[in-house]
Amino acid sequence: MPRIKTYALNFYPNWLTRALLPLFLCVCAPLLFAQQEKNDSLLLEIRQLTSQKGFSVKDTVYIDLLNELATAQRFYNTDSLLSLSMKALAHSKAARYPLGESKALLSLGDYYSDKGNSKEAIANYRSSLEIAKALHHEHLLLRAQNNLAGEYGYKGDYANALNGYLEGLEIAEKYQNNKMRSIITENIASLYASQKDYEQALFFYKKVKRINETLNDEVSSAETFANMASIYADMQEMDYAMFNINSSISVFERHNIKDWLAYAYEVKGKIYLKQQKFDWALFWYSQSEMLHSSLEDNRAEIDLLNGIAETYLGLQKDSISQRYAIKAFEISTKINFTEGRQKCAKTLYKIHKNKQDYAAALGYHELYQQLSDTISRIENQKSLSLLKTKSEHEKQKAELILQNEKELATQRNYVNAALAILLIFIVVTYLVHRSEKIQKNLNEELRLKTEILEKNEIELKSINETKDKLFSIVAHDLRGPIGAFQGLLNLLRNGEIKNSEFMDFIPKLAQDIDHISFTLNNLLSWGQAQMNGLITKPSITSIDHLVTDNINLLSEVATNKSIKLVSHIAENTIAWTDSDQIDIVIRNLISNAIKFTPSNGLVTIDSREMNDYWEISVKDTGIGMDRETQEKIFHESSYITTYGTDNEKGTGLGLSLCKEMVEKNNGMIWVDSVPQQGTCFYFTVPKAKKQYQKAS
């Protein structure tokens, strides 16, 4: 809950409020019904359960529903909170259900706390805490510890409050409960804020913000923003205050959190009041009032009433200001809130002074001075208690660390003695088994040499297979086109064909030269990968640019077959790959697509964004392939030479090279094809991470 809860009474808004009231009703109408819907849902569950045959009030599900409904009544219907908690407590004791009993005691503590009865609140919180500790119930234990420390803070016993929060913080850290770490750390910050130690308070609020970032919970963050806004307003840092309160309001409105939204509206009114923008202050106070009309929280009411009184005083409407100041004074007296009485006394002094009722003004001024002196003395005591408690806590931690170090030293002595005995045993064992150890070393050396020989044999076999494949490719796919070209030149040189006839072969020769160049590039890349090891150097790579470059490179070949090349690759398709290797993959896949697509066909290159990688596809409307061919084409041991729709020749090497390069770049490649309908090759590449982009 907020550091200082707020509440509001009905008053007639000024012209600004009337002008913006319809807008406010549109925003806040859902908030006014959200709580009722939750209550209705719980009541329906209770009715359905109690109507079942054989129902018993000792049913733990029924008791849990009573406790949940009681918790939902806080700040809305305190009488229901009390009656439901008492009923849940009685049934829990009858059912011997300690968890339900602890929950009910916690709600009773909340009831007495809100009524200003600290004695009863502390007693119930302590009982709830003891049961939660016995049950080792993490969440309930932390809630009871936090609420108990908070009640000490309301009492003004800051020593016990801080000590309780520090104990709760240690428990939360033990259970790694970041949600409760956030809440308890924020409450510690509130203690410093109440001392007007704003620098220390902001230090703890910033720690809370860091914890909230790990929770990824915007509601928890918004609660912290609202409290920080109040601190910044007291520090006269209005820009920071306004930024934080606006951030929190948008979250509370979106999540329909009425009590926190009422507090946020009150803080925004406070910011405008400190800027002496009284009309705007009154507007936001009125918003808080409309929400609080359905809340019951005496402690939260005082600051709002004081704020409204000060606002009307600034607007020179002293009679209205007096009414709110007196109401706030009465509530402060009822719950023994000295700071509230002090603020009201100061406001009433100014009002009566303006009315020239000097006797009443003097009385309120004397009361204000008396309360200020009391608060000053109390604040000094609180500050000393706060510092002393913190020092004692640090001292206890230091003593605990020292004790642990002594125990560790004793353990180290035992360990050293054991090590000495072990050393003697090792020496004896070494002397006894020395010969066996030497024999073992010899056997191990022999085994390692055998493994090296076997490894060398496998590598030699692989090199021979690579050599055979290289010679096969050169003999099969390069010798033919080169021999044909050589024969044609001999015919021209010997005069067996004319120049004009030779020129007719130029397109065919150009196609053969392109094929030879393409094959040599693949052959050199694959040979280097097989014989020397393929070295991959990833960097930031634009897949869009690679695809565009290869479309430009292969566009003439595609145009000769009347094939349309289309790229749907987005400009933001940025990968972390070796650009040269992926360039070869894209060029081979597009070249194959053109090769096996008949005239007037279509080749489409597309991309799809996944969580950590890009999926690139090259799809054609070509002749396709059967399932048996699909299963063979990526195997290194397979050698499939095929001819395209215009009898273009291929080495069968490109897809094996593509597979190896894609896998070297932490990707996968596969194919999906239907005969006579077309083929689509897919491969994946990792996305470029932010840290790679910064590094580049």
Image: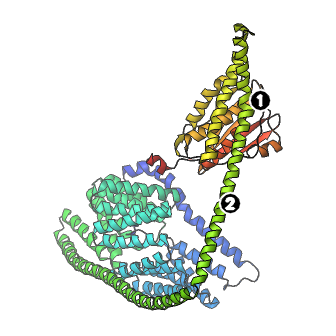
Q: State how far apart marks 1 and 2 are (Cα).
A: 43 Å
553 relative position to 342: left or right = right
Disc 2 secondary structure class: helix
Q: Amino acid at mark 1?
A: Gly
171 relative position to 333: left or right = right
Q: Amino acid at mark 2?
A: Glu
Closer to us: 217 or 177: 177
Q: Which residue is mark 2?
A: 454
Disc 1 secondary structure class: loop
Image quadrant where residue 556 sits:
top right
234 relative position to 404: left or right = left
The residue positioned 61% from the left and 48% from the top of the image is 664
The residue positioned 64% from the left and 29% from the top of the image is 517
Establish if 420 lies above or below 164. below
| Residue 555 showing in the rendered view | yes
- The label nearer to you, 1 versus 2, is 2
Establish if 209 lies above or below 537. below
Q: Tell me residue 642's x, y (percent).
A: 78, 34
* Disc assigned to residue 20: none
Q: Tell me residue 125's x, y (percent).
A: 47, 84
| Residue 281 showing in the rendered view | no
Instruction: Look at the image and tell me in which quarter the C terminus lies.
Output: top left
Tell which circle, 1 or 2, labels the residue nearer the N-terminal end: 2
Q: Which residue is mark 1?
A: 644
